[in-house]
Amino acid sequence: MRVLLTGGAGYIGSHTAVELINAGHTPIIADNYSNSCPEAVERIGRITGCNVETHTIDMCDAEAVDKLFAEGHFDACIHFAGLKAVGESVSIPIQYYRNNIDSTLVLLDAMQRHGVCNLIFSSSATVYGTPDKLPLTEDSPTGGCTNPYGWTKYMIEQIIRDAAVANPELSAVLLRYFNPVGAHASGLIGEDPSGIPNNLMPFISQVAVGRRHHLSIFGNDYNTPDGTGVRDYIHVVDLAKGHVAALPYCDSHKGCIAVNLGTGTGYSVKQMAEAFAEINGVPVPYEYAPRRPGDIDACYADPTRARELLGWEAQLGLSEMCRDTWNWQKNNPQGYKGAD
Ligand code: NAD
Ligand code: UDP
């Protein structure tokens, strides 16, 4: 299938491009590089031996997107494009609502006009807000998000659901990612946050590589076995394969469905830091710090629906997550910026 990847030069999009190519599909990337760089696309080429067609385009630009669709002959779209920094979304909410929602509206409009019916959307476990019961199934209550970023995901899910009611030809899969970590085993592509990382795994790996002094563990008085927050970390290659698995489902069904992509297993912050140090033989000094506002005790998926509907299950465990994150970080200590 010819699959448009909006935001395809980013962390999850680049790994998905590789897995799509491995599965015989043709990814086409559209990205404005607001949080990525063309080097990532070069690296996809080095891993797969394929030159990926790429368009530098803002997905909020309706005219440019219309032109892209007029020439693209896409069979499906995977909508990764979006701003994703939780803290930043609190400081600049309007930019977050505008970018994330406008890009989705522009995409849905272009899909309808050009008869493209298959959509996979990058949603997030953040739509569940503060869980009242674990593990989270797709029928768990949503809403109660703790920041504008989370609300954009919640609102976009609703917009796509409404679009699928109005257009019976539309088929949409809302993939609710848990916590993506890791990198391609080649060490050529990985997560390259700009500035100080917000997320745990890039922070740990930057401590290990010497870019940061120590990890601050945000809170050790949560209602979890060791008091530190518990999350469902999923290897980005497994996550990417989840998108490949969602394509045939999307193509053979109509309507809109949400599917969790997680492993079903939760690890604490302390376990993550200690596992990273042990598996890679590098020190990860940490100190306890106050809780981060908006954080919850624990969050992990019930991944049954993904197994039953998509035939997908996470294959990679904590050691691969830690090993591949470190392989990427130590080969690219400054991320893509350090590339020749
Ligand atoms: P990323 O920032 O690495 O990738 C997003 C890409 O979208 C970037 O390449 C960026 O340049 C591009 N982009 C942003 N706005 C755009 C626009 N208007 N037009 C064109 N391109 C645009 O982030 P990621 O981690 O790869 O996440 C991909 C998607 O998955 C995002 O929608 C994110 O919200 C969602 N998600 C990510 C996580 C996570 O922890 N990484 C968890 C849940 C959901
Ligand atoms: N965390 C931490 N120190 C950091 C970054 C994150 O202790 O520097 C914790 C955070 O409080 C949460 C977990 O690590 O319990 C995962 O946070 P992340 O931001 O990666 O993902 P979230 O689940 O918040 O989306």
Image (cartoon, helix red, strand yellow):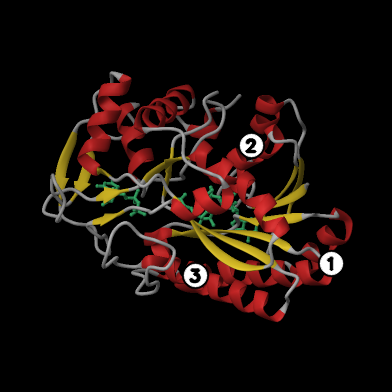
Marks 1/2: CA distance?
Answer: 26 Å
For the point 44% across and 32% down, which residue is it?
Answer: 316
Q: Which mark is residue 13?
A: none
Q: Position of residue 150 (x, y in %)?
A: 42, 66
**Which secondary structure, mark 3?**
helix
**Which secondary structure, mark 2?**
helix
Q: What residue does disc 1 label?
A: 114
Outermost residue, front direction?
Answer: 308
For the point 75% across and 69% down, which residue is it?
Answer: 62
- Indicate the amino acid at tag 2: Glu
Q: Position of residue 119 (x, y in %)?
A: 67, 61
Label 3 neighbourhood size at 10 Å, few (<14), some (14-19), many (20+)?
A: many
Q: What residue does disc 2 label?
A: 19
Quarter holding the C terminus is top right
Marks 3/1: CA distance?
Answer: 25 Å
- Indicate the amino acid at tag 1: His
- Indicate the amino acid at tag 3: Thr
Q: Position of residue 163 (x, y in %)?
A: 66, 76
Between marks 3 and 1 in the image, the one whose residue lies nearer the viewer: 1
Quarter of the view holding residue 98: bottom right
Mark closest to the chain's N terminus, 3 or 1? 1
Task: Say if mark 3 contacts mark 1, CB within 8 Å.
Answer: no
